[in-house]
Image: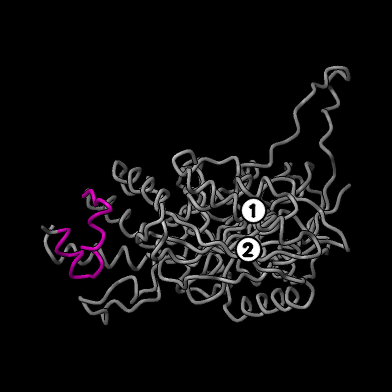
Amino acid sequence: MTDFRMPSLGADMEAGTLVEWLVRPGDRVKRGNVVAVVETQKGAIDIEIFNDGVVSELVVPVGGRVPVGTVLARLAGPVTEPAMAPPQAAPVTPPPIPAAPAAVAGRPHITPVARRLAGEHGIDLQRLTGTGPDNAITLADVQAAVSSVASGATPRRRAGFDPAAMRQAIAAAMTRSKREIPHYYLSQTIDVSNALARIERLNRERPPPERILPAALFLRAIALAVAKTPELNGFWEEGRFRPGDGVHIGWATALRGGGLLAPAIRDANHRSLEELMASMRDLVLRARGSGLRSSELSDPTITVTSLGDRGAETVFPIIYPPQVAMVGIGRIVTRPWVVNGAIEPRPVVTLTLAADHRASDGHRGGLLLVEIDRLLQEADTL
Amino acid sequence: MNAGEARTLIVDVLASIAPEADFDRLPGGAVLRDELDLDSMDFLNFITFLHQKSGIDIPEADYPKLSTLDGAVSYLTR
């Protein structure tokens, strides 16, 4: 018997409200399945389960607001072989891969936008028949249900995100960061003419859906450099540094109407430029909608923030605890630059690093920025 | 595509990116990125959706021509 508890989706989360169960007692679940939707200060998040097993009891009912760590459900398991199976036949199976968050078998697939609409209108997903692929519930299905109950007395349930609550979450996390973390800051101004030339060449031959933004190339260089400086990639917990189990970059994404989220791009150093761009696009859409999964908020081992081409030249990041570093990307600007003894106009970007002095020293931090610079000079190899 | 259809398409696409905006009050000559607070990802999505819904290829070099509502309408109807 194992307990499934309200997860912590970041240092700033104290409690969450259970807005939807996607499983029922008796359902078989696998590690990585999305089993519930929880409303947090960061909006409605799909919650994944960490164990295989069979759901034996749902402890917290829909609508319950409980602190982090509270038992939400109980699982019997791990799943045992059927009694009829010969005992010696148990095959050696590889460990489960928690990658794709498939819906639990037998439960409704639903698109995030449809789920949000259903949540806003208090539509019970169990009563809907999906018409999408694999019987997925689509936006149209929910819209039909909404219009059919529009005149009735269906209770409304809000599952959006509340800017005031998000503000409080940011306030709590940043106050803790400034109070506890001895930040040091470094900056490096980098000539990005090679990087931009590569992007321009790539995009010239690509239709809009396949185009790459400069930020994706910067992110790739950062991910590769972070992999070489493990002291900057991980967590400061209980007085010591715990290295990350991979380079999972939290990509800071501003939300319209205020606030931000930094969901993880897992194993970013092993992703191609195209894969990183696809991940960024996907995360931005889902962060601004409501389709983020719990692991995406709790996994980042380092955060990267890019001010974009309408932002300021330089950002001085504040570390998101318990992480130990954050990299900032300023706006690309054209500046006089000395090339082979002569002054030329060049596009440059200022990269900054805020790092936790308890976990690393400025020397290591400097090596990170210098390595990013070196990689961007060889942008064609990225 | 005539100008009215182009305008409807553009506003639909922009509304999916900036749902809070009031497009009835958006001046045709206003710079969309500033007026609607679009970052580079938003603008790329704007171009991508226009491309997918109109079939028109929009090279990067032409992005400045689509910086305003009026500019985008004339680009799609040229």
**Residue A241 percent coordinates (x, y):** 82, 57
**Residue A129 percent coordinates (x, y):** 51, 50
The residue singled out by tag 1 in the image is: A368
Q: Specify whether A245 is left or right of A288.
A: right
Residue B62 is a magenta residue = yes
Q: Quadrant of the C terminus of chain B?
A: bottom left
The residue singled out by tag 2 in the image is: A353
Q: Residue at x 77, y 71 (%)?
A: A181
Mostly what secondary structure, the magenta segment?
helix
User: Mark 1 falls within which chain?
Assistant: A
Q: In the rendered structure, which disc, 2 or 1, sits on the residue that comes first in sequence?
A: 2
Q: Specify whether B25 is left or right of A231.
A: left
> Above or below — where is B32 with respect to A345?
below
Q: Specify whether B29 is left or right of A116.
A: left
Q: Quadrant of the N terminus of chain B?
A: bottom left
Marks 2 and 1 sit apart, C-alpha to C-alpha, by 9 Å
Q: Dots 2 and 1: beta carbons under 8 Å? A: yes
Mark drawn on residue A356: none
Label 1 secondary element: helix
**Residue A124 percent coordinates (x, y):** 58, 61
> Do dots 2 and 1 share one subunit?
yes
Q: Which residues are magenta?
A: B56-76
Residue nearest the viewer, comparing A271 with A9: A271
Residue count near mark 1 (Cα–Cα under 10 Å), binned few <14, some 14–19, many ≥20:
many
Q: Which residue type carries mark 2? A: Leu
**Residue A80 percent coordinates (x, y):** 84, 33
